Image: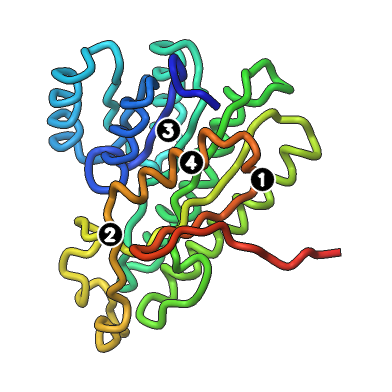
Amino acid sequence: MALEGKSALVTGAAMGIGRAIAETLLQNGAKVVLLDVNETAGKSLKEALDKQYGPQRTLFLNCDVESEEQVKAAFQEAVAAFGGIDVLCNNAGILNEAQWEKTVSINLVAVIRATYIALEHMNKLTGGRGGVVVNTASMAGLGPLPSCPVYTATKHGVVGFTRAMAAASTASGYGIRFNALCPAFVQTDLLTNFSDKLGQFSQLAAETRTFVNVSDVAEGLLQLVTDETKNGAAFMVKRDAKKYMTFPVLS
């Protein structure tokens, strides 16, 4: 998919990976709806992007992805502003083993919620124009992180959900591609007070430090969006390697 003139919605867009994703989409011609619960950071980013791209290219909406009402309202505002949604980037996420239920809620349940709401607007079977959904998973979605069992579980869930949705879209004719982005950890606010967030697994903190630049992650996102052959792909991004993962075929 060429991004020129397309509309994208990014959750967790105000900082870190989300911000890098939003900037990359804008650089390639898209209009971007920025969703984040951090209103201060979101408005600051919007101001910065307005100076570079003009005020008509972005829309910031304060949105808690745990709220179905807020997510539905955000999609409606996005469609009203830009005429539709072509790309959804489910990027909002946390790492907090001490608050494991909230980790499941944001990292997995919210991804499913936003995807299903997006289908109401994007599905070609119901009048949408199709598009691409890219879910930010993690290397923890491909193999276990001993210090983060719940985070690992949520990201495995994201990868599995993404691949199943891709198969469902192909079988049903949604006209939407679904891919998963699986980066190593990025030095962002996600890792602030890292040991404290690991709860009972804090003694294993030193075993989980594998970092990658946000720009590398955003480039991976761009590849998954623009390459029309990618559907159900899981793209691993490490500092020294980027590759598509292979999975066993279930008969």
Q: Is residue 223 left or right of residue 228?
A: left
Rendered residue at 29%/27% (across/down): 61
Q: Nearer the viewer, residue 105 or 238?
A: 238
Q: What numbered label is drawn on residue 71?
A: 3
Marks 2 and 4, the one that precedes in the sequence: 2
Between the C-alphas of marks 4 and 3, the distance is 26 Å
What's the residue type where badge 4 is placed?
Answer: Gln
Tag in front: 3 or 2: 2
Q: Work out whether 37 lies above or below 198.
A: above
Q: Residues within 10 Å of mark 2 (few under 14, many from 20)?
A: many
Query: Which of the two residues, 106 or 11, is positioned nearer the viewer here?
Result: 11
- Which of labels 4 and 3 is toward the front? 4
Q: Residue at x 33, y 34 (%)?
A: 24
The residue drawn where x is 44% and y is 43% is 221
Q: Position of residue 110 (x, y in %)?
A: 46, 47
Q: Which residue is mark 4?
A: 223
Amino acid at circle 1: Met
Mark nearer the N terminus (3 vs 1): 3
Q: Nearer the viewer, mark 3 or mark 1?
A: 1
| Secondary element at image label 2 | loop
Dot placed on the residue nearer the N-terminal end, 4 or 3: 3
Circle 1 residue: 165
Q: Is residue 66 above or below residue 99?
A: above
Crowding at dot 4, Cα within 10 Å, few <14 / some 14-19 / many 20+, comes out as some
Identify the amino acid type marked 3: Val
Which is nearer the N-term, disc 2 or disc 1? 1
Question: Tag 2: residue type?
Answer: Val
Quadrant the N terminus occupies:
top right
C-alpha gap between disc 3 and disc 1? 20 Å
